[in-house]
Structures are given as structure tokens and as C-alpha cells.
């Protein structure tokens, strides 16, 4: 008989999705289509989003994902990151002793605060990190005013 360690946090993401669906069912006007896509995701890659003054950067950890399996879309000021981390088909499911690596489809959506020009967005993929650079429009950039003392 094999002893298996119990991890109480293992299904936390699933629990959170269920709670979110419970609350969203009681609120009218919510988009069920987007929520269904998110709840069907097998995993959610971690992201960092930060501002450098003239651009907003989104860095996503996507280890084991090829750049061909990732798509970035922008519609109605929402940046959507979709993709899939494929299973190793050579290893049969019954041959695993432990299986902790997240696999399958993923879907993340982020609302952008300002109108951006999708043609100016740059993305690069290096060592499992997707870096998306979103330049701010000129009117969004802070302007410094020099004050003259008389």
C-alpha cells in the first residue's frame, strides 16, 4: 500500500472558480461565455504586469509551451492570452507515480486601462517567458511642465 501525501491547496483554483460562478449567477448582465472559457482552463500561467512610464509590460511564465501554441488577441480594450501546454503522449497515464505539472489549455484576459494601438504591441518569447510590451498612447504619457520663477 502506497502512502500518498495530501495537499489541501491542490484544488484551490477549482474552488475559487466555483465560488466565482456562484456569485456571478446572482449578478445580471455578466458574460457567461468568457467565464465558461476561464473555468474550462486546465491551468492559469502566472503573470506580472508593470508600468515603465511610456509602456505597460505583461510577462507570463509559460514553461514547456512553444510560441506556436500561444496567441495574443486584443478586442474592446481586453488583452487575451490563450494557449496550450501539450501532454507528453509517449508516457501513459497509468505509468505516472506523481503528476504535478500543469498541462492543457489556458486562458487569461486583462482589461487595459487606456485605448492602445494594437499595431504597436510587441511580443517576444524567450526561455519560457512571454514578454508583451504595450506602448501607451501619446495622450496617456505624463508631461512635465517647467515652472519659471519670476
Image (spheres, rainbow, N blue to C red):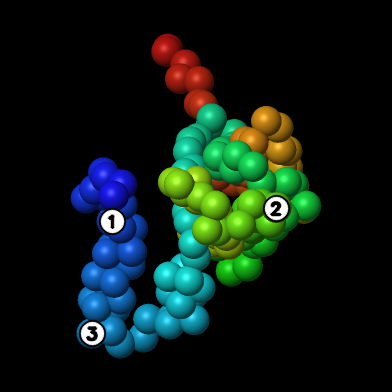
User: Does any portion of residue 116 appear in the rendered image?
Assistant: no
Taking the view exactly as shown, the residue that stands out farthest to the front is 1
Q: In the image, what residue occupies the spot 63% across and 67% down?
A: 75
- Residue 45, horizontal then vertical, whole percent: 50, 48
Instruction: Look at the picture and state if 45 lies above or below 94.
Output: above
Numbered circle sitting on residue 26: 3
Q: In the image, what residue occupies the spot 31% across and 47% down?
A: 2
Q: CA distance from mark 1 to mark 3?
A: 22 Å
The local crowd at label 1, few if under 14, some if 14 to 19, many if 20 or more residues have their Cα within 10 Å, is few
* Residue that numbered label 1 is attached to: 12
User: Does any portion of residue 43 appear in the rendered image?
Assistant: yes
The nearer-to-camera label among 1 and 3 is 1
Instruction: Look at the picture and state if 87 lies above or below 59.
Output: below
Q: Secondary structure at mark 1?
A: helix
Dots 1 and 3: beta carbons under 8 Å?
no
Q: Earlier in the sequence, mark 1 or mark 3?
A: 1
Q: Secondary structure at mark 2?
A: loop
Taking the view exactly as shown, the residue that stands out farthest to the top is 150
Q: Using residue 59 as the reference point, say whether residue 68 is left or right of it.
A: right
* Residue that numbered label 2 is attached to: 90
Camera-side residue of 86 and 65:
86
Amino acid at each position: 500500500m502506497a502512502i500518498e501525501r495530501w495537499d489541501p491547496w491542490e484544488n484551490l483554483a477549482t474552488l475559487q472558480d466555483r465560488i466565482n460562478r456562484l456569485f456571478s449567477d446572482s449578478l445580471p448582465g455578466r458574460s457567461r461565455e468568457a467565464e465558461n472559457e476561464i473555468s474550462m482552463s486546465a491551468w492559469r500561467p502566472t503573470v506580472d504586469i508593470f508600468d515603465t512610464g511610456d509602456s505597460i509590460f505583461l510577462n507570463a511564465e509559460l514553461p514547456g509551451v512553444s510560441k506556436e501554441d500561444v496567441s495574443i488577441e486584443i478586442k474592446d480594450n481586453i488583452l487575451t492570452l490563450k494557449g496550450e501546454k501539450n501532454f507528453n503522449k509517449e508516457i501513459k497515464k497509468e505509468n505516472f507515480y506523481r503528476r504535478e505539472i500543469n498541462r492543457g489549455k489556458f486562458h487569461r484576459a486583462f482589461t487595459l486601462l487606456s485605448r492602445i494601438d494594437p499595431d504597436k504591441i510587441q511580443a517576444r518569447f524567450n526561455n519560457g517567458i512571454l514578454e508583451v510590451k504595450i506602448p501607451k498612447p501619446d495622450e496617456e504619457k505624463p508631461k512635465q511642465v517647467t515652472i519659471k520663477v519670476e
